[in-house]
Amino acid sequence: MTLTRLAAAGLAAAFLASAASAQSAADTDEVRQACAADFQKACPTATPGNGSLKACAKAHFMSFSQPCRTTLKAVRARMQQSGQTNAAQGD
């Protein structure tokens, strides 16, 4: 794997981490596999920790590959479901 692909994989993982710190390792791996090339192409200068990955994903979502979009939607849905479950348990 080239340095560029490693960087893209890191960006994809960091995007999810910035979106929800409680995500599972499986979700991170899933997004990394499906989206690394998309993040590298659309967001080569985005860096973890400052919101730029999330902003880039929102801005370029429709240009991402279908597998990446599908994966991001599925992970987001799981995160929202988990958040709703946690909120309900806290009531």
Image (cartoon, rainbow, N blue to C red):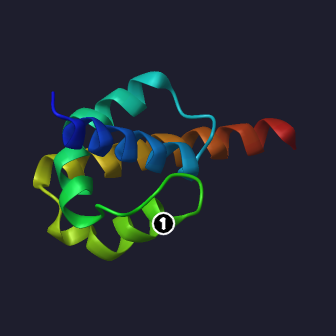
Q: Is residue 7 left or right of residue 91?
A: left
- Decide which of 52, 30 is in the foreground and name it: 52
On screen, 19 above or below 29? below
**Amino acid on which the number 1 mark rests in the picture:** Ser
- Residue drawn where x is 59% and y is 62% of the image: 50
Q: Quadrant of residue 44?
A: bottom left
- Residue drawn where x is 55% and y is 64% of the image: 51
Q: Quadrant of the N terminus?
A: top left
Q: Is residue 49 left or right of residue 28?
A: right
Answer yes or no: is residue 55 visible. Answer: yes
Q: Look at the numbered disc 1 and give the secondary structure of its residue.
A: helix
Q: Is residue 69 left or right of residue 54?
A: left
According to the image, label 1 marks what residue?
Answer: 52
Answer few, some or many: residues within 10 Å of disc 1's Cα (few below 14, many 20 plus, some between 14 and 19): some
- Residue drawn where x is 30% and y is 64% of the image: 43
Q: Quadrant of residue 6?
A: top left
Q: Quadrant of the C terminus?
A: top right
The picture places residue 41, in percent across and down from the top left corner, at: 18, 60
The picture places residue 81, in percent across and down from the top left corner, at: 54, 43
